[in-house]
Image (cartoon, rainbow, N blue to C red):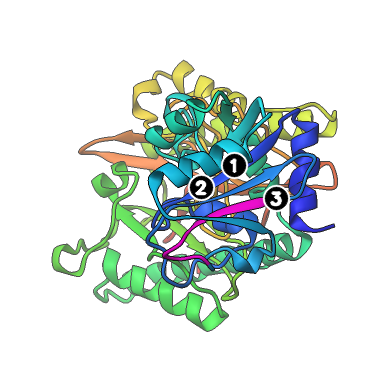
Amino acid sequence: MSRFDEIAHALGEAALDGWLFYDFRLSDPLAYRVLGLSSAGITTRRWFCFVPADTPPIALVSAVEPNRLDSLGVQKIVYRSAAEMLEALRTMLAGRRRIAMDYSPNCAIPYVSRVDAGTVELIRSLGVEVVSAADLIQTFEARLMPAGLASHHRAAAIVRAVVDETFAEIGRTLRANEPISEFSIQSFVLARFESHGLVAEEPPIVAVNANAANPHFAPKRAADTAIRRADLVLLDLWAKEPHPDAIYADQTWMAYAGERVPDEYARVFAIAAEARDRAVALIVNRTAARETISGAEADRAARAVIEAAGFGPRFVHRTGHSIGREVHGTGANLDSLETDDHRTLVEGSCFSVEPGIYLPGRFGVRTELNMTIEGGRARVSAAPAQTAITALLAPGAR
């Protein structure tokens, strides 16, 4: 089945007349990925590609770049002026009542809202109802192929091993009274990734004490923080294999640079871990029962635990995100806070579960694992998850 046949089938299931793809100067990378179109080459003019549910696709391209969509192998119309473009769109969409575009009403899901408001207004002016392609995008972006999922599991196992290697290195360095810092450990992690054959878009997060209260803290050589005994350390690692269809793994673990984790750190971490496990259990149980679960529902399950413990305002981000060829993918996120992600967690998807509690000026905790849904079963990657903060200098610790 060709990609256009797959799209037509999905449109039929969604009771839509078609999917109108649009791009201006690479404004919609999702259109390129769903269509299997290379983004290389000059792209300075507007193009459209309409994929109907019941007839062959048709492309609309500028006379300045008439060959931009030739690789798709579909019929094309070439326009010169804005008036010609509008008339061609009118012709392409004649008789169509309800079509999808890559936008989200009220930008509720910004990850898929790629078409600007003016272009949506333009299409609606032709008497066509425009609906969000969010669920269609998930069908083609979040349903990972078996080879991609296998690459994720290999990466997850390595990332988990690098966590152990990094904690061992911090413990060794502290025992030897050698200098160590957030930046030096970040460099250590990157070197371990390279040695294991993994790559990452951005370097990992290594955050100590109050810095761990910043969810996206980034170590800097010029403003480095030493890691000392009795420090709390947050380690957030993401990496994947170095090929185009590889899928990321993304994990967060916590450690204490001492022999015994202080009670307050242990208590707050236990709350975050319970929230994580509540979301995991809901996803596992719903999936096993062949019942749907939305990203928003999973988020609320975790958030309820943290709110009940009195830390609701200190959980400042969504519970998890889609994972794909980018560490933050375009499938359903576990989110009812930053957005209301109504999309369901689908077969073949990969996503994180990572609640956190952040106490500015003091410390923060986060625990993150990854899950996949494969063969009708939700599973945790590189299990087991962290159940307690690791005491790096405890007797018997490496």
- Side (left or right) of 251 relative to 364: right
Disc 2 marks a residue whose amino acid type is Tyr
- Please state which amino acid type lies under the numbered disc 1: Leu
Asked whether the viewer can see residue 267, the reply is no
Q: Image point 46% across, 46% down: which residue?
A: 84
Is there CB contact under 8 Å for labels 1 and 2? yes
Tell me if mark 3 has few (under 14), some (14-19) or many (20+) residues whose alpha carbon lies within 10 angstroms of its own. Answer: many
Relative to 139, say whether 80 is above or below.
Answer: below
Q: Which residue is mark 2?
A: 22
Residue 4 inside the magenta-drawn segment: no
Q: Give the mark nearest the N terminus, 1 or 3.
A: 1
Cα separation, mark 1 vs mark 2, equals 7 Å
Which quadrant, please, contains the N terminus? bottom right
Q: CA distance from mark 2 to mark 3?
A: 13 Å
Q: Look at discs 1 and 3 and give the one toward the viewer.
A: 3
Tell me the quarter of the picture where residue 352 sits.
Answer: top right
Instruction: Give 373 or 245, whichever is nearer the viewer.
Output: 245
> Badge 3 is on which residue?
57
Numbered disc total: 3
Extent of the magenta region: 57-66
The reply to whether the magenta stretch includes residue 60 is yes
Percent position of residue 392, x then y: 43, 60
Marking on residue 20: 1
**Displayed quadrant of residue 110:** top left
Q: Are marks 1 and 3 in contact (CB under 8 Å)?
A: no
Local SS, label 2: strand
Name the side, left or right, on which 397 lies relative to 19.
left
